[in-house]
Image (tube, rainbow, N blue to C red):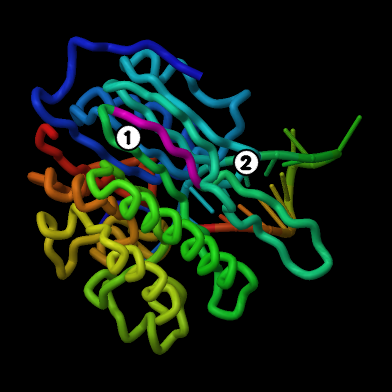
Amino acid sequence: MVAGVNSSVGNVGGVKIATWNVNSLRARADRVEAWLNRSDVDVLAIQETKCKDDNFPWELFENSGFEVAHFGLSQWNGVAIASRVGLDDVERTFPGQPPFGKPGADEVQEARAIAATCGGVRVWSLYVPNGRALDDPHMPYKINWLDTLRGHARQWITDDPEAQIALMGDWNIAPQDDDVWDIDLFVDGGYTHVSPAERAAFQAFLDAGFADLARPFTPGPGLYTYWDYKQLRFPKKEGMRIDFVLGSPALAARATDAFVDREERKGKGASDHAPVVVELSGP
DNA sequence: ATGTCCCTTGGTAAGGGA
């Protein structure tokens, strides 16, 4: 599906890209529209739309001058890409994307990955499986899902070292100890997001040649992208850095600035995630 | 400072997911 394009706006010579887990696009519609209209982003990768196409708020994007592509199969998950610099070659799921399955039940494909070419950048909006618990069947699903994606990602830049690729979304992994507010609590408590297997799955993307485009401009400690609704995590500054923009080598060379829009986590009706914005110079 | 919040359903409270 495609909405209107506003070619009179844009970041001259460069592109501003962002990722944001909105935790229901319908519940967040007013905030998302307001943010699109004030953030000056050219491309927004959205996770957790929590809807199907038939109740997706297409008008929101049209009103804001964005084209949008959506992949939603149920009330869970759901990913989208909005762009005002073109939206071509839309792809839903990556090749061989593992479905979730457990013994005795049918396998289920989930709406966790969508891609489009926007302003010359191959953009992926990714909602990595949560994992739920270290001993839950969703944990090997999470690792396998990431391993499969990473295999493709490495091949893409092997085949074309100049490829402009952004893998962005909610990775549901805190790669470094400073990416959570209390690493001892997480490790001693056997929490997900910080286990060696999860961190290895994330590190494999870096080893393959992708780079975290935001971290150099958003140093920790205490720099987070997500704060649980429960237990006053946001006002207590107890968050997690789990949303990332990973860039291919050619894209990483263009990153000039980045920030986490922490203001968007404030106030009534906020998502539990904040947008992560990366500015790219012209190619 | 939201001491959760969002989704759905033969619903109007309860279960599931994060």
Pick whichever of labels 2 and 1 is earlier in the sequence.
1
Magenta range:
A113-118
Secondary structure beneath label 1 = strand
Q: Using the image, determine if residue A52 lies above or below residue A252.
A: above
Label number found at residue A75: 2
Query: Which secondary structure type mostly characterizes the magenta part of the structure?
Result: strand
Residue visible at 62% across and 41% down in the picture? A75
Please indicate whether residue A33 sits to the left or right of residue B3 in the image: left
Circle 1: is it few (<14), some (14-19), or many (20+) Cα within 10 Å?
A: many
For the question of whether residue A162 can be seen, the reply is yes
Q: Is residue A98 left or right of residue A1?
A: right
Residue A253 coordinates in the image, percent (x, y): 12, 48
Disc number placed over residue A44 in the picture, else none: 1
Q: Position of residue A163 (x, y in %)?
A: 27, 43
Quarter assignment of residue A86: top left
Camera-nearest residue between A158 and A36: A158
